[in-house]
Amino acid sequence: MAARRIIIDTDPGQDDAVAILLALASPEEIEVLGITAVAGNVPLALTARNARIVCELAGRPDMRVFAGCDRPLKRPLVTAEHVHGKTGLDGPVLPDPQMPLQEGHAVDFLIDTLRAEPAGTVTLCPLGPLTNIATAFERAPDIKERVQQIVLMGGAYFEVGNITPAAEFNIYVDPHAADIVFKSGVPLVVMPLDVTHKALVTPPRNDAFRALGTPVGDAVAEMTDFFERFDKEKYGSSGAPLHDPCVTAYLIRPELFRGRHINVEIETTSDLTLGMTVADWWGVTDRAANALFVGDLDADGFFALLTERLARL
Ligand code: RIB
Ligand code: CA
């Protein structure tokens, strides 16, 4: 089967970094056309820097990385240094990037690529706030029908929020952008906290990363050592949740995941529940299904795949 051609939209973030490494380690299944950085976990200058650090760690200084939107559509930017550290990639000591940032804005790259490639052949993989994607859809509505699929990390239902009692971080940071994307009509696969909180880097799993004995294995182990603090303290969980790698793992082995095709809408006005993904899991409305909302995964299978692929870098 031909490799899936994707654009990764990201706010690295240690878990974004692992998702990018997994994609770049899997050329049989995934061809990364480019990486677009967005403000989220840390400001744009840092997410654009971190994306290049990760590409160089993967041995891909040729990868095209573009800087995108530096703030949400309407809301002030909220960042997550308390989770990811000041740099956004705290944990390992990694060299400053040598590869250049591409000229041009990430949104133009999204629009130009979707217009140039055959319709239905490019998948978008947002791993952070949806600002770049929504801006592209608003500026060039014609590209929406050309997108093959959007596979994103964001939202929560049974797991409720991680940044407010009701909302998950990616959606909360830019709920207006999320609303545009969820109403776009583009086929969506959503990896919410309901599934990503089951993808925990337990000590044996992190030992397996370290046992690779490679710079990539060591860096990933040190990233998860750092960013597990927040979730262990808040949830008492047994390790760091690998949120964003659920997106790229789905492209490689979708059978590892299970969910329901349901309607999901975004709260954009209430101060109390801003950014909540209102998932009609029980089908109590007549709102049309717009997303495969994933609730479960084969965690051992996920980590076996991830470890095997990271060993290739
Ligand atoms: O809520 C988790 C999400 O927010 C992940 O994508 C993480 O990287 C942060 O962006
Ligand atoms: Ca992210």
Image (cartoon, helix red, strand yellow):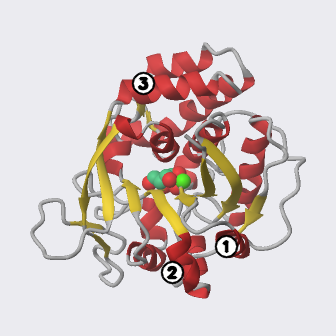
Q: CA distance from mark 1 to mark 3?
A: 34 Å
Residue 6, horizontal then vertical, whole percent:
61, 54
Ligand 1 has an atom within 8 Å of the beta carbon of the residue at disc 3: no
> 285 and 225: which one is in front?
285
Amino acid at pointer 2: Arg
Query: Quick check: 103 above or below 62?
Result: below
**In the displayed structure image, the side of residue 142 where residue 241 appears, left or right:** left
Q: Quadrant of residue 76?
A: bottom right
Pointer 2 local density, CA inside 10 Å: few below 14, some 14–19, many at least 20: few
Which label sits on residue 70?
Answer: 1
Amino acid type, residue under disc 1 in the picture: Asp
- From the viewer's side, name the closer residue of 143 and 44: 143
| Residue for badge 3 | 202
Q: Is residue 209 above or below residue 83?
A: above
* Mark drawn on residue 75: 2
Q: CA distance from mark 2 to mark 3?
A: 35 Å
- Residue 31, numbered circle: none
Mark 2 or mark 3: name the one nearer the start of the chain: 2
Q: Nearer the viewer, residue 206 or 112?
A: 112
**Amino acid on which the number 3 mark rests in the picture:** Thr
Residue plotted at (35% across, 50% down): 193
- Quadrant in which the N terminus is drawn: top right
Q: Is disc 1 in contact with disc 2, using a CB cutoff of under 8 Å?
A: no
The quarter of the displayed image where residue 287 is located: bottom left
Tell me the quadrant of the picture where the C terminus can be found: top right
Please determine whether, in this image, residue 269 is positioned above or below residue 15: below
Question: Real-space Cα distance between discs 1 and 2?
Answer: 12 Å
| Element carrying mark 1 | loop
